[in-house]
Image: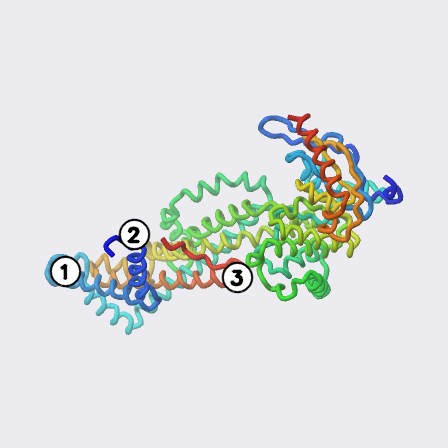
Amino acid sequence: MGGMSATAIQLSVRNVSKSFHGKAGEVRVLDDLSFDIHQRDFVSIIGPSGCGKTTIFNIIAGLIEADAGTMQHHGEPIGSLRGRVGYMMQKDLLFPWRTVLGNVLLGLETRGIGRDAAEAKARQYLKSFGLTGFENVYPKTLSGGMRQRVALIRTLIMDPDILLLDEPFSALDYQTRLYLEGVLKEAVETYHKTVILVTHDIDEAVALSKRVVVLSGRPARVKVVHDIDIAAHSPIAARADHRFSGYFHQLCAELDIQTEKTT
Amino acid sequence: MTLTLPSASSAVKSRARARRRASFDTALGRAFLQALAVIAFFFVWEVGVRLGVVSAFLVGSPLGIFQNAFRMFFSGELISDTWTTLFEALLGFVIGTIIGSLLGLALWYSVFVARLVEPFIVAINSVPKIALAPIVVLWFGTGLVSKVALSVSLTAIVALIAAYQAAKDADPDLQSLLISMGADKHQVFFKAVVPSTLPAIIATFRINIGFGLVGAVVGEFISSQRGLGHLIYTASSLYDLNTVWVGLFTLMIVGFLLYYVIDLIERTSLPWKQASTTQQVQV
C-alpha cells in the first residue's frame, strides 16, 4: 500500500520450514513461510493458537534451527539474530536472585560492558521508565505490570535490532495491559525500534501495529498482511479512531474463515 | 435469648480458644513450655529410678548424668572431646559439600557424561557409607583423616545429587533468554544455572551437617583416642551409662546448635528468597 513502498526491508524471512518430532510422529509447524519486516516496522502476527508463532521467534533469535529456508538482515544473509534481538515473553523471566538493577544489567553483562558504564546507563533507563527507587528491590516484591516494565527495560537497554515480543502482556489485567501498551509504543518511537509482536489479542494488534500478519493454521503460512493506517499517538487513542473497528472486524473475519476451513 | 446460632457460638468459642493459645504463643511463652517439658522428663526419669521402676544400671539417672557432666566439663575432658568431634564433623561437612556440589554442577556441562555416570552415582549412593568405616580406618589411620574421610563420603554424595538435580531443573526459559542475548555456555552456567541451584545446595546443609556428625562419631567408634564417639563407646563398654548419656546429650546440643547456625546461613545467604515471608496458614 501507498506509504509503505519507500520503507526499506530490514529482515526478510524466506521459505522457512520447521518440523518437530513428537510422540505422534513428525509435526510440520512451519511450511515454506516467508515474510518481510521493514525498518522501524511494528508488525503483529496473529493466528490460531499452536500455529507456530513462537517457533518463528525461536528461529529468528537463534534458539532453534530451521530445517530449510533463509533469512536476510539488511540484505545480508544471516543464520539468526542471536545476541541482536530483544526477546520478551508472557513470563517476565526476571531472574529472582537479581535486583531490578541487576536484571536490567543482565544483557550488558553478557556483552562484557564495563560495570560503571553499564550501571549508569541502567539507572538512566530506570529513571525514564519511572522506576527510580526500585533499583535494589527483588522482583518478587513487584507487581506483574512493574515486573514486565523491568523486562521491557532489560530488552531495550541492549539496543537490539529487533524486538521479539511473544504475548508480553497477556498475563496482565486489562488496565495494566493498556498502560504497558502505551509505554511500549512510546519507547519504540523514542528508541526507533523495529518490533514483531505475537499476540492473540486482535484489539491489541490493531491498536499498536503498522501492519498485521495473519497466519493460517498448522503448518503456518502467511494468509494475508493488513496495513493498519491509524496515525494515533497512543494505543488508547488508536482504539477511538473511526477506522479501528473496521480493521478489527476484518481481522476477526480473516481468523474465522480460517478456523472454519481448518476444523 | 435462648436461641443462638450454632455458627456464631462456635466462632466465639474458637476465638476464646485462640486467645488462650495466644497468651503462650510468644517466643518467651514457648520457651517456658519447652523448658517445662524437659524438666518434667528428667524429673519423671529420676523418680522412676528412685522408686526402682527403671534400672539405673541400664538407663542411668539424671542426677548421675549431671554430676558426670559437671565433673567432665570442669576437668576440660568434655570440651576437648566435643571440640575434636565438632572439628572432624565440620571439616568433613565443608569438604564433602564443596566437592559434591562442584561435581554435581559440573555434570550440567555434559549431558553425555552425566548420563554415563548416573548409574554409578546411584550405585554409590545406595551403599550404606557407614559400611565403609572399617576400610576407611584401614586406609587413613586412626586419627583425624579417617573421620573426615567418612564424613566426606556421607556428605559429598548428598550434595552431588542435589546440585546435579537442581542444575538439571534450572528454568530453561531463563537460559533461552540469555542465549538470545548472545550469552555463551559459561555465561548461561554462571548467570542462570549456578544461582538457581543455590537454594537446593543450601538445603542440603541441614541434612549434611547431621551426616558430618554421623561420619565423625562412627569413625570414632571404630578406632580413636578421643572425641565424643570415643567417649560414648568406651563408657558403654564399661556399663557407665551416665557418661554415655553425657556424650549423647552433648552430641544432641552440638547438632542442635549447628542446625541453628545453618538456619541462619540459609536465611541470610539468599536475601531474594526472603523478600516475602512464608506464613503458615492458620487452621
Which residue reaches farthest front?
B1
Q: Secondary structure at mark 1?
A: helix
Query: Image height check: is A121 above or below B133?
Result: below
Picture quarter with the N terminus of chain B: bottom left
A118 lies left or right of B25: right
Could you tell whether A166 is left or right of A228 in the image?
Answer: left
Determine which residue is flagged by label 2: B5
- Left or right of B32 on screen, residue B133: right
Tell if the residue under mark 1 belongs to the same chain as the one under mark 3. Answer: yes
Give the residue at mark 1.
Answer: B48
Quick one: SS at disc 3? Answer: helix
Q: Is residue B76 above or below residue A169?
A: below
Tag 3: residue type? Pro
Say which chain tag 3 marks. Answer: B
User: Mark 2 touching mark 1, by CB under 8 A?
Assistant: no
Q: Which residue is mark 3?
A: B271
Residues under labels 2 and 1: Cα distance?
Answer: 50 Å
Mark 2 is surrounded, within 10 Å at the Cα level, by few (under 14), some (14 to 19) or many (20 or more) other residues, namely few
Q: Position of residue A199 (x, y in %)?
A: 68, 42
Q: Residue furthest left?
A: B51
Amino acid of disc 1: Gly
- Of the two numbered discs 3 and 2 on the same chain, state the one appearing first in sequence: 2
- Residue B44 location, quadrant: bottom left
Q: Chain of mark 2?
A: B
